[in-house]
Image: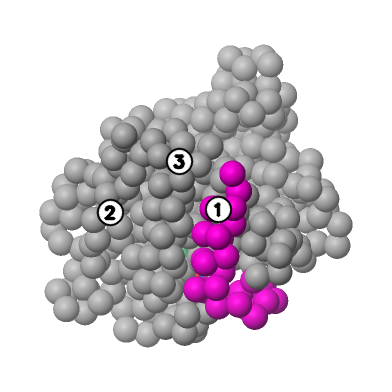
Amino acid sequence: MNTYKIAVIAGDGIGKEVVPAAIEVLDEVAKLDGSFQFEWTYFPWGCDYYLEHGVMMPEDGLETLKQYDQIFLGAVGMPELVPDHISLWGLLIKIRRGMKQSINVRPAKLLAGLESPLKNPQNFDITVVRENSEGEYSDSGGRMHSGSDEIAIQNAVFTRKATERAMRYAFELAKNSKGHVTSATKSNGLTYSMPFWDEVFDDVKKDYPEVQSVSNHIDALAAFFVMKPHAFNVIVASNLFGDILTDLGGAIMGSIGIAPAANLNIEREYPSMFEPVHGSAPDIAGKGIANPIGQIWTGKMMLDFLGHSNAGDRVLNAIETTLASGIKTGDLGGTANLEEVKNAIIENLKNDT
Ligand code: NAI
Ligand code: MG
């Protein structure tokens, strides 16, 4: 029996509600599978911790996390009391960068029983591989002068190493799923970074002659996500392009409350971190009405990464069966609460043999 040591950071707002629900589902699927179990360790880090201690996590927080196999995170943010840049950089980004989680993976897939805001979504199933360590989100730059002379410079940093790593990960995914790869570029507007991106893409694709690939400009790609999302399979994108595209991906699925994400250390040198796309949703926190599906699907991604994709598929099937039976939270137009959705998913897990 494999035992996985998971560090749990429920965080703030609805993170505190959806994380326990997802853990119940994961424990259930582990029990049904029988070949592994989870050992959860809870860390009370986040904005409450900040209000008490003046930091989002302890000084040695990263060292502590390194002792775990993976990190399961809800959401952080309490914008009324703690500025977002403090909560984001003091915890989330600190962990992503400190643990070298250089790849962010976000699927966008039309689930059975869900209505997409698109008129004719067909059956799309996209995985966006986003470079997670550099690109447009670098801290190189500066501001000078003031008033009408004021200048702001924000440099984008693209290294061959990180670019190639993201692209190879995308091609491996496509190769294993008999899919194809689309590269998000903008080499008609950005004259240094994106021609470089295209060159690296052309180099990497030579190693995958069996995988079809194409480059699309990011603006056209955004339009295609609305017009023909079913045309895509794996997409590799820079940090900024991937960020924007994955919010759009969440939107065409039907709600941000269901969208999952993984921050991967693909070298497996440090733990990876699994967290849904949505935030702490202060507007609905504490009411028991948050949609737990984003967090539960995120748990499926953790199962996949741990090598238990059978168990992961069972979780996704149980989610789809639940949605198809009409048990949905308010964000999806339903009337069920979090508890009801979670219980239905667990029932469907047990019934699917
Ligand atoms: P948000 O994702 O928390 O909420 C946006 C809207 O979606 C709200 O109306 C909310 O009620 C709804 N929503 C989100 N998740 C839902 C769910 N599971 N079920 C039902 N409805 C859901 O984004 P917002 O409002 O911009 O940010 C709130 C706080 O969360 C901020 O402090 C922000 O910095 C933080 N945040 C944290 C993230 C993280 O920890 N990874 C990601 C995004 C935002
Ligand atoms: Mg975003």
Mark 3 falls on what kind of element?
A: helix
Q: Residues within 10 Å of mark 3 (few under 14, many from 20)?
A: some
Q: CA distance from mark 3 to mark 2?
A: 18 Å
Of the numbered discs 1 and 2, the one sitting upstream in the chain is 2
Question: Could you tell me the amino acid type at mark 3?
Answer: Asp
Residue 353: image quadrant is top right
Tell me if residue 188 comes above or below residue 116 in the rendering: above
The answer to whether mark 1 and mark 3 are in CB contact below 8 A is: no
The residue tagged 2 is 40
In this view, the mark in front (3 or 2): 3
Sequence order check, earlier mark of 3 and 2: 3
Residue 187: give x, y in percent of width and height.
65, 38
Amino acid of disc 2: Trp
On residue 33, which mark appears? 3
Q: Quadrant of the N terminus?
A: top left
How crowded pointer 1 is (Cα within 10 Å; few <14, some 14-19, many 20+) is rated as many
> Relative to 1, does residue 42 appear above or below in the rendering?
below
- Looking at the picture, which amino acid does disc 1 mark? Leu
Q: Which residues are magenta?
A: 328-353
The residue lying toward the viewer, choosing from 100 and 329, is 329
Query: For numbered disc 2, what is the local secondary structure?
Result: strand
Say which residue label 1 marks.
Answer: 349
Left or right of 328, for residue 271: left
Q: Residue at x 49, y 27 (%)?
A: 164
Q: Comparing marks 1 and 2, which lies closer to the viewer?
A: 1
Q: Nearer the viewer, residue 143 or 167?
A: 167
Q: Is residue 87 visible?
A: yes
Q: Residue 337 appears in which quarter of the rendering?
A: bottom right
- Report if the beta carbon of the residue with label 1 is closer than 8 angstroms to ligand 1: no
The x, y position of residue 20, in whole percent, is: 38, 65
